[in-house]
């Protein structure tokens, strides 16, 4: 099949009307969808018109400004222009993007950090906490040394730090 001037003009007309490459191929006859797409690119035709209307922000429902929010979150909404492919061209579209979602954290005042006994490695026993404190390469490095239960190498305070439930660790991230 050859692209005659008459067929090229019909292709341009159908493309500007917003028909798809498959629909144009069916109307021209004897040509595939891929051949139509290739010819459109070689002719550098602009993106075809949409059959159902334009692609504007009006098609998207706007978020109401007084929508209820989750109690501990504050967010800022920004409008950003993005490019997305549509047919043979790239369309620019403005979208709303949530930039920040902040959560209020409460400070716990009931946490008590026990005083460590500042033991060295040679002073540790089976019943002392083996939680390391500080940098091992520094002179002030030591171990907690507080009393530990029989089944744990750590005192009750350091055991809570060392053995956190997995669900709680995920929630803290």
Image (cartoon, grey):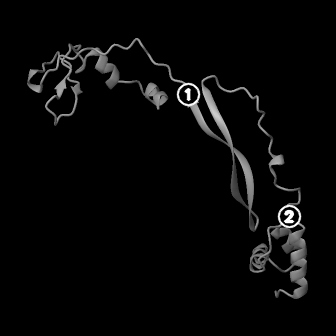
Q: Is residue 78 shown above or below 125?
A: below
Q: Is residue 106 left or right of residue 147?
A: right
Separation of disc 2 and disc 1 at Cα?
Answer: 45 Å
- For the residue pair 152 and 120, the one nearer the viewer reads as 120
Count of labels shown?
A: 2
Q: Which mark is residue 103?
A: 1
Q: Is residue 19 shown above or below 72?
A: below
> What residue do we see at 80% from left, 49% from top?
57
Q: Is residue 41 left or right of residue 9?
A: left
Q: Mark 2 against mark 1, which lies toward the viewer?
A: 1
In the rendered image, residue 7, in percent from the top left (x then y), is placed at 88, 83
Q: Do tag 2 and tag 1 residues touch (Cβ < 8 Å)?
A: no
Whichever of callouts 2 and 1 sits on the residue coming sooner in the sequence is 2
In terms of secondary structure, where does tag 2 sit? loop
Q: Is residue 64 shown above or below 146?
A: below
Which residue is the site of mark 2? 49
Q: Which mark is residue 141?
A: none
Q: Quadrant of residue 11?
A: bottom right
Q: Residues within 10 Å of mark 1 (few under 14, many from 20)?
A: few
The quarter of the picture where the N terminus appears is bottom right
Q: Is residue 158 left or right of residue 139?
A: right
In the rendered image, residue 69, in percent from the top left (x then y), is placed at 68, 27
Q: Quadrant of residue 39?
A: bottom right
> What residue do we see at 78% from left, 33% from top?
64
> What residue do we see at 40% from left, 11% from top?
110
In the rendered image, residue 17, in percent from the top left (x then y), is placed at 90, 67
- For the residue pair 41 and 7, the one nearer the viewer reads as 41
In the rendered image, residue 50, in percent from the top left (x then y), is placed at 85, 60
């Amino acid at each position: 099949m050859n692209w005659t001037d008459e067929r090229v003009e019909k292709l341009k007309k159908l493309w500007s009307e917003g028909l798809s490459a498959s629909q144009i191929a069916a109307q021209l006859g004897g040509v595939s969808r891929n051949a139509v797409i290739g010819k459109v690119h070689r002719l550098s035709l602009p993106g075809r018109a949409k059959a159902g209307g334009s692609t504007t922000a009006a098609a998207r429902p706007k978020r109401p400004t007084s929508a209820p929010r989750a109690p501990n979150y504050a967010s800022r909404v920004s409008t950003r222009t993005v490019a997305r492919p549509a047919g043979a061209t790239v369309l620019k579209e403005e979208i709303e993007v949530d930039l920040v979602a902040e959560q209020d954290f409460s400070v716990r005042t009931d946490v008590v950090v026990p005083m460590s006994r500042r033991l060295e490695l040679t002073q540790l026993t089976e019943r002392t906490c083996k939680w390391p404190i500080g940098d091992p390469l520094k002179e002030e490095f030591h171990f907690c040394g507080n009393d530990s239960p029989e089944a744990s190498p750590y005192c009750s305070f350091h055991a809570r730090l060392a053995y956190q439930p997995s669900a709680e660790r995920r929630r803290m991230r």
